[in-house]
């Protein structure tokens, strides 16, 4: 198969679909999203049947619990997919917004307007929910999208995309705005990354280290990606003990296999003996394995010894490394050395400490007295997200519909010439 030619054709179809979405205006895109949500609900039995078969196949191959959790859909999760699309439908449309306007001394009136990016390629692995989130956000922003999921979830993803396209048809819009390759071959990814003439305008990878590394190494088109979610929770000497315990437990154990789960707990040495035992008991009661440095193990001897690798690992499992640090400065030094720029949590009742740490931490999202689990497009009110961008261009943090637009400038004059 000539993958490059076929990918170019998919991109051309998606671009035509994007043009139809843009011509439909905000009202038309809203109508499409409502219909997409309805279609996902109607297709629930087909989506769940495909998913059950793939979960069983993954289990038979020895997939671990974290992988199975990411792969698995149940009725509640399918309902959440549809609800997420419906939430996107209720959002303000991000296209055509006047971001700023000014007048120059020569009389020129200049406005910066938001416009659709064009066609976006989304490459993801075992999370079938990404298909619904990405399709909804791209439609909201007037973009075409080519979705390529992993082979482990190919049937589930195909069922979700079929429902999305049915919703577009029901709304009277071009279903080609949402595309997917006919199979999960990696050659489609290679073609998407290589095709800088007539291809996608942006690639967003969503997956583990090998996928992200492959995309960043081979892409000849712009890439918006996130690295590991090595997220820390710092418990300060001025933290409320009950808040600290609850925030740590929720950050780690709400869902261990997601990128916003905490992987390292940092505790101020000034309160470690007072606060760490209670936090450790609460985590252990939830089945969390603790790996501590020497200072942490002196306080909680049941911890296993942490190694250098633990500070650098995104576990995506019920494991948490624990380090005792010398106050805020020690926490900042640890985060600067090991953080991945995803999400960091500061637990303190001292407003000055919180503000100083917020200013000093280099991360896409910083939480003060709140669980890292809120580092999520849905929790930010975006309805969903394509990912958490940890770079600096062209967006950072949860990527929703507004982050899938770019700018154009409109200049009004009265006959001015530069001369």
Image (cartoon, grey):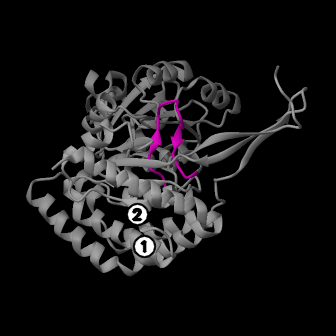
Q: Which residue is under mark 2?
A: 176
- In magenta segment, residue 62: no
**Above/below status of 123 relative to 381:** above
Q: Which residue is under mark 1?
A: 79
Q: Residue at x 66, y 40 (%)?
A: 408
Q: Quadrant of the C terminus?
A: top right
- Asked whether residue 280 appears in the rendered view, the answer is yes
- In magenta segment, residue 399: yes
Q: With 52 as the anchor, is 131 left or right in this view?
A: right
Q: Residue at x 64, y 64 (%)?
A: 26
Q: Nearer the viewer, residue 186 or 378?
A: 186
Q: Which residues are magenta?
A: 384-401
Q: Position of residue 190 (x, y in %)?
A: 25, 40
The picture quadrant where one finds residue 353 is top right
Q: Position of residue 384 (x, y in %)?
A: 49, 57
Rate crowding at label 2 as few (under 14), some (14 to 19) or many (20 or more) other CA atoms within 10 Å. Answer: many
Q: Residue at x 20, y 45 (%)?
A: 186
As helix, strand or loop, the secondary structure at mark 2 comes to: helix
Q: Nearer the viewer, residue 322 or 108?
A: 108
**Above/below status of 133 relative to 357:** below
The first of marks 2 and 1 along the sequence is 1
Disc number for residue 107: none
- Asked whether residue 76 appears in the rendered view, the answer is no
Q: Position of residue 206 (x, y in %)?
A: 35, 45
Rate crowding at label 1 as few (under 14), some (14 to 19) or many (20 or more) other CA atoms within 10 Å. Answer: some
Magenta stretch, main secondary structure, is: loop
Q: Residue at x 44, y 41 (%)?
A: 202
So how many labels did they put on this image?
2
Q: Nearer the viewer, residue 355 or 274?
A: 355
Disc 2 or disc 1, which is closer to the eye?
Answer: 2
């Amino acid at each position: 198969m000539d993958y490059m030619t076929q990918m170019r054709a998919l991109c051309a179809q998606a671009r035509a679909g994007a043009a139809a979405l843009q011509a439909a205006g905000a009202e038309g895109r809203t109508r499409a999203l409502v219909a997409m949500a309805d279609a996902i609900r109607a297709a629930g039995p087909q989506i769940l049947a495909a998913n059950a078969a793939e979960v069983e196949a993954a289990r038979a191959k020895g997939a671990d619990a974290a992988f199975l959790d990411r792969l698995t859909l149940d009725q509640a999760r399918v309902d959440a997919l549809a609800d997420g699309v419906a939430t996107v439908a209720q959002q303000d449309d991000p296209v055509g917004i006047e971001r700023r306007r000014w007048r120059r001394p020569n009389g020129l009136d200049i406005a910066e307007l938001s416009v659709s990016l064009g066609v976006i390629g989304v490459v993801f692995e075992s999370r079938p929910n990404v298909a619904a989130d990405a399709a909804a956000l791209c439609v909201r922003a007037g973009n075409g999208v080519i979705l390529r999921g992993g082979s482990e979830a190919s049937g589930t993803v195909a069922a979700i995309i079929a429902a999305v396209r049915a919703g577009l048809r029901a709304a009277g819009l071009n279903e080609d705005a949402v595309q997917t390759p006919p199979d999960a071959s990696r050659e489609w990814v290679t073609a998407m990354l290589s095709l800088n003439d007539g291809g996608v305008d942006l690639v967003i990878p969503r997956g583990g280290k090998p996928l992200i590394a492959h995309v960043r190494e081979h892409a000849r088109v712009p890439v918006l990606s996130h690295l590991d979610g090595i997220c820390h929770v710092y418990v300060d000497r001025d933290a409320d003990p009950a808040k600290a315990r609850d925030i740590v437990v929720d950050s780690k154990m709400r869902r261990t296999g997601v990128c916003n789960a905490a992987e390292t707990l940092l505790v101020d040495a000034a309160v470690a003996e007072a606060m760490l035992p209670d936090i450790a008991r609460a985590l252990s009661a939830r089945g969390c394995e603790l790996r501590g440095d020497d200072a942490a193990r002196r306080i909680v001897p049941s911890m296993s010894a942490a190694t250098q690798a633990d500070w650098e690992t995104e576990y995506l499992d019920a494991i948490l490394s624990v380090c005792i640090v010398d106050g805020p400065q020690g926490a900042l030094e640890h985060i600067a050395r090991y953080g991945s720029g995803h999400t960091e949590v500061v637990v303190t009742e001292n407003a000055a400490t919180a503000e100083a740490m917020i200013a000093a931490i280099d991360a896409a999202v910083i939480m003060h007295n709140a669980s890292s689990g809120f580092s999520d497009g849905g929790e930010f009110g975006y309805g969903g997200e394509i990912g958490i961008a940890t770079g600096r261009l062209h967006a950072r943090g949860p990527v929703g519909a507004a982050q899938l637009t770019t700018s154009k400038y409109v200049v009004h004059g009265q006959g001015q010439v530069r001369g």
